[in-house]
Amino acid sequence: MRKAKPDRDDVVRASGPGLCGIEVGVASAERVITILDALARALEARGLSIELPGSHMRVALAPDELTFSLVERIEKRPHVPTMEELAAEERQKKKRERETHVNLWSLDYKRAYPEFDFVRSGELSLQIANEYVGLRRNWADGKRQRLESLTDDIAGGIVAYLAGIKARREERERWHRNWERQRHLDALARAREERETKRAEFLNRLAVISTEADQLKTFVARLRGELKENGSGELARLLEWAEARVLRLERELTPDGIAEALGDQELFPEADPLVPPEVEED
């Protein structure tokens, strides 16, 4: 900041790679240096250091960090024109009047002096830019205090704010874990419902097969009993087909047949993947 060249408004800037992103009136530069030096030392005593990304300042306690800036209050004041500016304004006024007389109109009217001045007040404040976490994040010059006397309080406030940022992050992470867990539980519940439906359908099919097999056996036995001989032609072929179907259905109802029908449907797995996990303590 001491090397920075003041601009036409006597403002010095320390912005860019490895700098702190500060711009203040040249009269406040030494104050800023004193404040930042004291703050850096107070933070170092707490195991923290100021990092300089270029447009602001940063303090990190991985994985959390906060950014802050040191700014000077700018006052907006009505501009008091000088005699030269008043004279220039009067010349512009007469020029417009002459142009009006000859029907020359211009919409590009600009006064010879600004309506307001933006004045560097010399009042400094330090502001934390992170989301509000319920803790103090602004310190400023006042009637009875100056930032130079608050650097230790500011360092403590930064440490507390970092703790608040950590608590807020952990709260969001906890909420996200709970949301993911609930989404997983809901998916498991839907999968169990779908599996119960498939189980019922599987058992109903076995019941249908059993009923059909019993009915066919009864029918074939009655028809065989009514025939004096084995019969011939289409009737014999019908009985042969019916008896073969009874055997096929009965094979499906044996333990081996049922196990084969279950196949890879995983309706009754030994290790059930759809059992809800135990509740985890956060």
Image (spheres, rainbow, N blue to C red):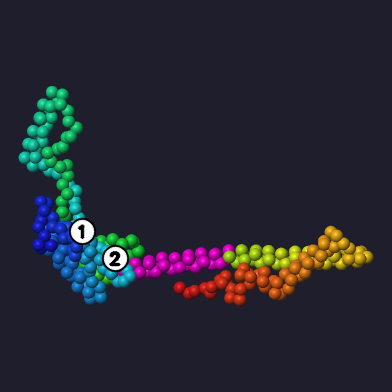
Tell me the tag on residue 71. 1
| Residue at x 34%, y 61% (from the top left corner) | 132
| Residue at x 18%, y 60% (from the top left corner) | 16
Quadrant occupied by the N terminus: bottom left
The kind of residue tagged 1 is Val
Instruction: Residue at the far top: name it.
Output: 102
The kind of residue tagged 2 is Leu
- Tell me where residue 202 appears, x and y as whole percent: 68, 66
Q: Is residue 168 left or right of residue 221?
A: left
Most common secondary structure along the magenta stretch? helix
| Disc 2, SS | strand
| Residue at x 85%, y 60% (from the top left corner) | 233
Tell me the tag on residue 204. none
Instruction: Based on the picture, tell me whether residue 211 belongs to the magenta stretch.
Output: no
| Disc 1, SS | strand
Instruction: Based on the picture, tell me whether residue 186 belongs to the magenta stretch.
Output: yes
CA distance for labels 1 and 2? 16 Å
Q: Choose the circle earlier in sequence order: 1 or 2.
A: 2
Instruction: Residue at the far front: name it.
Output: 233
Crowding around mark 2 (Cα neighbors within 10 Å: few <14, some 14 to 19, many 20+) is some
Crowding around mark 1 (Cα neighbors within 10 Å: few <14, some 14 to 19, many 20+) is some
Q: Which is more foreground, mark 1 or mark 2?
A: 2
Q: Which portion, as a residue range, is magenta?
A: 162-190
Q: Which residue is mark 2?
A: 66
